[in-house]
Image: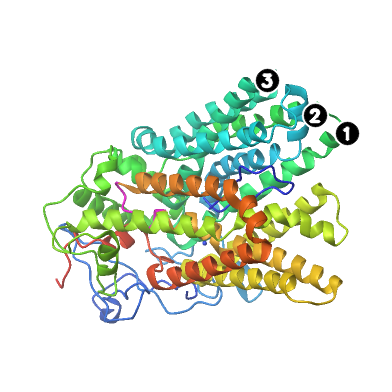
Amino acid sequence: MRSTSVLRQPVVPVPAILAAPFNPKLCPFFTATSATCNKHPPFHSFSAPPPEKFRLPAAKKPKFPELDSQDEKGPLLSSNRNEDVNGTSTSIQENGSEKVDLGWLPAFPHVLIASMSNFLFGYHIGVMNGPIVSVAQELGFEGNSILEGLVVSIFIAGAFVGSICSGSIVDKLGCRRTLQTDTVPLILGALISAQAHSLDELLLGRFLVGLGIGVTTVLVPIYISEVAPTKYRGSLGTLCQIGTCLGIIASLFLGIPSESDPHWWRMILYIASIPGFVVTIGMQFAVESPRWLCKAGRVDDARKVVHDLWGPSEVNEAMEEFQAVIRNDGDDLQSGWLELLEEPHSRESTFRTPTGMKFTWLRWIVNIPCTSIPEANFFNGAVAFIGGALFVLQQFAGINGVLYFSSLTFKDVGITSGALASLYVGLTNFAGALCALYLIDRQGRQRLLTGSYLGMAVSMFVIVYAISFPMDEELSHNLSIMGTLLYIFTFAIGAGPATGLIIPELSCSKTRVKIMGFSFSVHWVCNFLVGLFFLELVERLGVAPVYATFGAVSLLAATFAYFFIVETKGRSLEEIEMSLNSSFPQGDE
């Protein structure tokens, strides 16, 4: 989902967020007369074998809706009227011949408040890029590139620590209280940085901000995925990316006076504390994750949240799914890192995709005997591997490097203002995030990831062509600009938002936060490495070979997404877990 850089960047980095077939129509709940809807089709992975039925360890098994192959109108526009169990239409308004589905609206205020944390993330990404020279002059380290880089990189160090520590806090306090608690380092860090009179104070403030951001980037995608109705989980999840984009754009606008006022950087850091207070107060009125409430034994509270946000028709089925997962995983709120490796169940089997294919390729990669790994254990390890791999590929596809070098590209065509170049980049990223909002529940995560990385690869190769081959200078500059903006746009459509969304969807309930924390810790390490070595590689090899490498990694990422990411669109988190984890009993009734 995100990207920052340890480089002193004229153009701020675009976050990677915390995005295939069309959106499905849900078939009616199964009845004695609807025998044809009694089976559920598998996820898309490698092939489409016959569907399977779930057998849950419960006296009363929840029945899952069947997905149609396509629904061109998607989740927000539908020609069919959603009905509850009593046949009453829900969240639909007439609009000519179309019917506008407003089923996302009850969850929207809660998701919006949580996304304010991502606004803070974006704001802190951009807030130091413009005024860093003024900060260095006032605090006495001007011209020291190492210290200037340290001011930026200490943020990444704090984010790494926050990502690792987030799991234990969320398991104990829940999502809502953790988000409120997380605003403490964000607010304190902003205030300490704003009033800093020495480099040490500034570094302390930046580290505290990074600590809070590390928790935020892990937690917000999880909170949204657990609170949002299944049908709108993808669209609401892209608000993470949109919030981060708006934060970056806000920091750019507010940072414009710093070009003429050398002390303005203090004011924009003071302003950075305001969204933290908004999140603290707003989350007091937001709901807790119904999944966490159910694990905590607060079943009535979980039922009320589902009733209010998802609708009365979803309550019984959702509660049955929650409890089925808890019976399988256990009701212990705390999960440990070793649960990604240790045996949580006594049964032994193999990790199975819904197509029936076994992940023997992953066992070969990690050199683990196929007969020695318990099913649910390998399920956790496989998803952690996929999450880490997605962020490795995302970061080494070069988003930070492209953004750093884009300022020079804009200067070649006469755009000498760094703020204006940053604005073009930010608006392009925001436009891509809006497209992701529309497409992600219509086209699906896998298709957006694959298409996004293919577009990024094409963009890189266009820039390499413009740099390497003789042509008119104006044409070369225009191709470079087009390739840069196309790269950022296609990144924001899929590789940004979908990466942070797919990982919590694939993770099991008990270890979801731990897997996200591990994945984002990998993200921050790769982010640091790319920022550290990008300029040196450009100086030694040139821009064209480095960009060609970014294009090759993008192609590799597209291949990985096509073959190894299963589609999660239109399925509840429990249904996904039951499909992917064979520790749930399977077979016919």
Relative horizontal placement of residue 543, taking residue 558 as reference (left or right): right
Q: Amino acid at mark 3?
A: Ala
Q: Where is residue 554 drawn, in percent x and y? A: 54, 67
Picture quadrant of residue 368: bottom left
Picture quadrant of residue 101: bottom right
Q: Amino acid at mark 1?
A: Ser
Residue that carries the numbered disc 1 in the rendered image = 260
- Whole-number angstrom distance, CA of label 1 to CA of label 2: 9 Å
Q: Residues within 10 Å of mark 2 (few under 14, many from 20)?
A: some
Q: Where is residue 69 drawn, in percent x and y? A: 43, 79
Which of the marked residues, 3 or 1, is nearer the chain's N terminus? Answer: 3
Residue range highlighted in magenta: 504-510
Residue 505 in the magenta stretch? The answer is: yes
Q: Amino acid at mark 2?
A: Trp
Residue at screen point 68% across, 36% down? 145
Residue 10 in the magenta stretch? The answer is: no
Q: Is residue 81 visible to us here?
A: no
Residue at screen point 74% across, 72% down? 466
Q: Nearer the viewer, residue 29 or 137?
A: 137
Q: Residues within 10 Å of mark 1 (few under 14, many from 20)?
A: few
User: Is 473 above or below relative to 169?
Assistant: below
Q: Secondary structure at mark 2?
A: helix
Question: Is disc 1 in contact with disc 2, using a CB cutoff of under 8 Å?
Answer: yes
Residue that carries the numbered disc 2 in the rendered image = 264
Question: Is disc 2 in contact with disc 3, using a CB cutoff of under 8 Å?
Answer: no
Q: Nearer the viewer, residue 72 or 355?
A: 355
Q: Nearer the viewer, residue 76 or 430?
A: 430
- Whole-number angstrom distance, CA of label 2 to CA of label 3: 13 Å
Q: Where is residue 515 drawn, in percent x and y? A: 36, 48
